[in-house]
Amino acid sequence: MKKEIWKDIPGYEGFYQISNLGKVRSLNRYVKSKNNSIKLLKSKRMTISIYDVGYEYICLSKKGKRIKHKIHRLVALAFIPNPNNKPEVNHINGIKHDNNYLNLEWATSSENQQHAYRTGLQIPQKNVRTGIKNSNSKQVLKYDLHGELLDEYECARIAAEKHMVATSSITESCRTGKIKVRGFVWKYKN
């Protein structure tokens, strides 16, 4: 078994550390109590929780704010270089609670999805209608910032492919009317 190595969690330096095996500990530190006295909080191993979908997470506190963090992502941030700035962390063996740094890799969303299909973690759905074949699909209109109609698309997926953005960006813009995607305003056709 590999030796356990501890590193500060990025953004929580001096407060918490993560190990290359996916364990979390708090560090010794002095804090002000409610009556303004100073007390020492001793270092301790922290309890890790599990989301319904199987990923482990931990709640970390800093400046009175508690935030949930997925363990595999914290391990990757501390121990795995990410020269291509990939946004997701993939479990190589498909086991969501195996957060050893040797089992993790940075991935794009597409690489992560392909890995899930290749390893049988996710099964492709057959006969699923997407885009214009889907009866729930809505036509999308593209406007410039002055409100002039520029283009019309059969569905958000086609518009997204044309503008090389995520389909969710187009649908979110259509739904909220607030987000500008690629400098355009997007709306669903009535």
Image: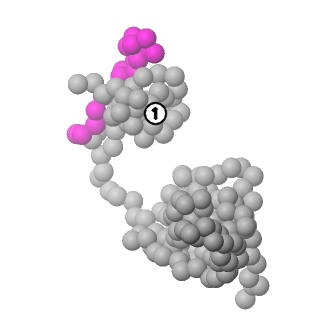
Position above or below: 161 against 114 = above
Residue 153 at least partly seen = no
Between 132 and 35, the one lying in front of the other is: 35
Q: How many marks?
A: 1
Extreme-bottom residue of the structure: 1
Classify mark 1: helix, strand or loop.
helix
Pointer 1: what residue?
160
Which residue does the image show at 30% across and 51% down from the upper left? 128
Residue 127 counted in the magenta span: no
Quarter of the N terminus within the rendering = bottom right
Find the magenta span and give its range: 135-153
Colour convention of the picture: one colour
Which residue does the image show at 34% across and 26% down from the upper left? 187
Would you say 163 lies left or right of 8 here? left
Would you say 72 lies left or right of 27 here? left
Rendered image quadrant of residue 158: top left
Which amino acid type corresponds to the residue marked 1 in the rendered image? Ala
| Structural crowding at the residue carrying mark 1, measured as other residues with C-alpha within 10 Å and reported as few (<14), some (14–19) or many (≥20) | some
Report x, y in % for residue 40: 67, 77
Report x, y in % for residue 106: 65, 59
Position above or below: 165 against 60 = above
Report x, y in % for residue 47: 54, 80
Quarter of the C terminus within the rendering = top left
